[in-house]
Image: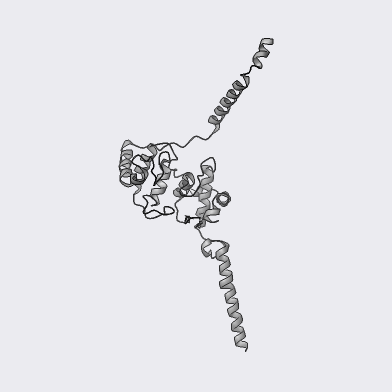
Amino acid sequence: MKALAARRHHRFAPVVLLLLALLVTGGVYAALAPSPAQADTASTADIETGKKLFQANCATCHGPNAEGTTEAPSLVGVGAAAVDFQVSTGRMPMQMNGPQAEAKPRQMDEEQTAALAAYVASLGAGPAIPTDEQVDGSKGDPANGMALFRTNCAMCHNAVGAGGALSEGKFAPPLFDTSERNVYQAMLTGPQSMPVFNDANITPEEKRDIIAFLDEQDQGSAGGLTLGSLGPVSEGLWAWIIGIGLIIGGAVWIGAKSS
């Protein structure tokens, strides 16, 4: 009994217990944590084609091996979804330096974009391009999407996705003409000043709910004229300049008629 008690109070016992606790914690986390996004599977031919496109259009800024330069970040590990978003919206290749890359007509077609995405995805695991089912807003809950959007997105993109100004010449773009796939990919990859909303922050089902809410905004406003959907500023200007202006004009006209 004395020998057993001595072992229990050995000076290295706390260290052993700490190591065991860390081991158990790591095992539980590995078992329960969401699995990391994997790189898209693609053929060798697609990857080679994408590499040639990258070297011709992207390597000047991002480096010959996408390792990044002083002009642009590394693309290792960004995944296919980031490439598909940036290239399909025309933001990349970038036309000129500025506070942020702006959307413009795309310079690569679907096939070229897919090959470029396959090459970048081959450099390191990252978010994959979402499936059609994942981005199908008709399968989402717009009411839940509204609550999620106004909690996580409205402070930049406006309450209905009309966009808004940010600091240092940057801006959150309007989302009315953004495709469902690119809305999902933007949440997944966090382009420009936007934070990343991975599946641990907003689940795939919740992302689809947000898409469902944005889809409903394209169906018009139940309240009538939207005034650009820019909120109380535009509504206040309308009330003070147009509304009160008409009242004053009417009062002047009535006074002139009665004199």
Quadrant in which the N terminus appears = top right
Q: Is residue 74 above or below residue 249?
A: above
Exactly how many numbered labels are in the figure? 0
| Residue 135 shows up from this direction | no
Q: Nearer the viewer, residue 35 or 102?
A: 102
Q: Residue at x 60, y 87 (%)?
A: 257
Horizontally, residue 18 falls left or right of residue 115, namely: right
Location of residue 131 (image quadrant)? top left
Residue 72 in the image, given as x and y percentages of width and height: 40, 46
How has the structure been colored for display?
Answer: one colour
Q: Nearer the viewer, residue 143 or 75?
A: 75
Q: Nearer the viewer, residue 52 or 68?
A: 68
Residue 212 in the image, given as x and y percentages of width and height: 52, 51
Residue 52 in the image, given as x and y percentages of width and height: 30, 42
Horizontally, residue 143 falls left or right of residue 189, namely: right
| Residue 61 shows up from this direction | yes
Residue 259 in the image, given as x and y percentages of width and height: 62, 89
Q: Nearer the viewer, residue 82 or 3?
A: 3
Residue lying furthest right: 1
Location of residue 111 (image quadrant)? top left
Q: Residue at x 36, y 46 (%)?
A: 61
